């Protein structure tokens, strides 16, 4: 079960996406999420000033976009416990739909944007997500769509192939 907290569903009944604005989606805690290995989502925001949540699981991990570079491109940041990985340069363009995918490995995270692996600056001891409370999805985003949780490691070619297919 999930709750739409202050969000707007946009589009026709067959192709809807969420415009969270100041709202978010909240997904109840479920043991099936305890073994998450890959998370994917389509995101968009007019600018990346501040921090927007792609997915955050309370007590486990967070995937956010913010901290723009000089060109206004946002940086994906992955936090799991004391481990932090962030795009070296801005990798998510402002005001454009972008596909963000994160894989959690024993050795750290791997981030792909629009199907391409990005360089990460990492600190702390790598960790993988585990049990946690509810998920918060899309807080601070202009648009979020087609969020997917996988209990398998998707290959970069699988992710790249789907990143080229806009869900809208």
Image (cartoon, grey):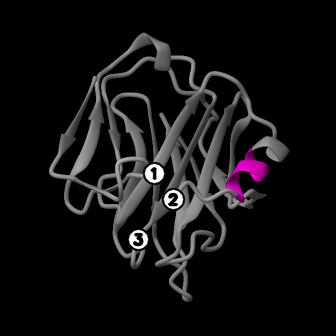
Residue at mark 3 = 45
Residue at mark 2 = 168
Which residue is farthest front? 13
Q: Earlier in the sequence, mark 1 or mark 2?
A: 1
Q: CA distance from mark 1 to mark 2?
A: 8 Å
Q: Magenta span: helix, strand or loop, mainly?
A: helix
* x and y, in percent, of residue 86 in the image: 59, 58
Q: Give the residue displayed 60% in from the left and 30% down from the top.
A: 127
Asked which quadrant contains residue 156, the reply is top right
Q: Give the residue displayed 70% in from the left and 24% down from the top.
A: 152
User: Of helix, strand and loop, which one carries label 1?
Assistant: strand
Q: Earlier in the sequence, mark 3 or mark 2?
A: 3
* x and y, in percent, of residue 129 in the image: 53, 27
* x and y, in percent, of residue 14 in the image: 42, 47
How many labels sit on residues?
A: 3
160 drawn magenta: yes
Q: Is residue 151 above or below residue 105?
A: above
Q: Earlier in the sequence, mark 1 or mark 3?
A: 3
Quarter of the picture containing the N terminus is: top left
Packing grade of label 3 (10 A; few <14, some 14-19, many >=20) is many
Mark toward the viewer: 1 or 3: 1
Chain part drawn in magenta: 159-164
Which residue is farthest top? 31
21 lies left or right of 43: left
Residue at mark 1 = 145
User: Of helix, strand and loop, which one carries label 2?
Assistant: loop
């Amino acid at each position: 079960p999930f709750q739409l907290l202050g969000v707007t569903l946009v589009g026709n009944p067959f192709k809807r996406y969420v415009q969270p604005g100041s709202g978010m989606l909240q997904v109840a805690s479920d043991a099936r999420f305890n073994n998450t290995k890959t998370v994917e989502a389509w995101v968009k925001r007019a600018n990346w000033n501040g921090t927007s949540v792609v997915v955050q699981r309370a007590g486990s991990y967070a995937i956010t976009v913010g901290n723009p570079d000089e060109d206004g491109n946002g940086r994906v940041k992955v936090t799991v416990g004391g481990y932090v990985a962030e795009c070296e340069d801005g990798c998510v363009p402002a005001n454009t739909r972008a596909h963000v995918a994160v894989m959690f490995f024993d050795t750290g995270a791997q981030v792909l944007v629009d199907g391409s692996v990005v360089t990460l600056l990492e600190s702390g001891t790598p960790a993988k997500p585990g049990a946690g409370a509810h998920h918060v999805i899309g807080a601070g985003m202009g648009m979020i769509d087609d969020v997917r949780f996988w209990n398998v490691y998707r290959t970069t070619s699988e992710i790249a192939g789907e990143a080229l297919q806009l869900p809208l």
